[in-house]
Image (cartoon, grey):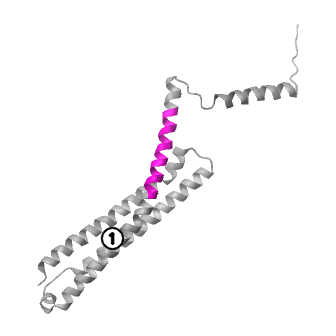
Amino acid sequence: DCYILYITDDMIKNYQDLHIGREESRKGMINYDQQSLEKMLKEQKAKYKTLADEIKAKKLQSDPSTFFDEIKQTNDDVIEIYRKVMDNPENIDQRFDLGCLMDYVSRAYDYFYRSISSTRKADKLVKHAREKGESPEDANLSGSYEREDAESYINEAKEYINKVKKMIKEIETQLK
């Protein structure tokens, strides 16, 4: 005996409706097998890592205005030290490393700018990856290099500001 099964368009449509409907109804359902739980854990970690990075980026973007003010204040302090040295003839005879002060402040401005630039590049990369439909983990990875650079740059800027403040204190103790 030979049997032939004709699959009609209605049968295909019914199958697709049932299959798609079943998958839709299973969304949000939690399977308690080890593989499903590990997959869910991985997705949740990626989601929260992305959220944490966004919060850090926003904090860094809000922090720059205050850090920029700190750099500006440090620059004003350096100018004041120059003024104190130049106003007193006895101070002019002493050797102070005033050039380093200005150089360090300049470097702090430069690293600060690089940090802001890298943060913005990272945000654009993540946004672009999300628009392409990448998973949160992959989208986050696309901007991770730039975020690491941004953090490194802001730390460098802070180190230079701390060096300048330390040098200012040392110079002020030596001023007459």
Chain part drawn in magenta: 40-58
Residue indicated by mark 1:
70
Q: Is residue 107 above or below residue 63?
A: below
Whether residue 111 appears in this view of the structure is no
Q: Residue at x 67, y 29 (%)?
A: 25
Residue 127: where, in percent of width, then height?
57, 55
Residue 104: where, in percent of width, then height?
29, 73
Q: Which element is circle 1 on?
A: helix
Tell me if residue 67 is in the magenta stretch: no
Q: Residue at x 34, y 75 (%)?
A: 72
Three-letter code, disc 1: Glu
> 29 or 13, which is in the foreground?
29
Whether residue 33 appears in this view of the structure is yes
Magenta stretch: dominant secondary structure = helix
The quadrant of the rendering that contains the C terminus is bottom left
Q: Is residue 121 above or below residue 36?
A: below
The quadrant of the rendering that contains the N terminus is top right
Tell me if residue 53 is in the magenta stretch: yes
Instruction: Give the total of numbered labels.
Output: 1
- Dividing the picture into quarters, in which one does residue 77 lie? bottom left
Q: Is residue 77 left or right of residue 169?
A: right
> 164 or 144, which is in the foreground?
164
Q: Residue at x 28, y 65 (%)?
A: 159
Residue 56: where, in percent of width, then height?
43, 54
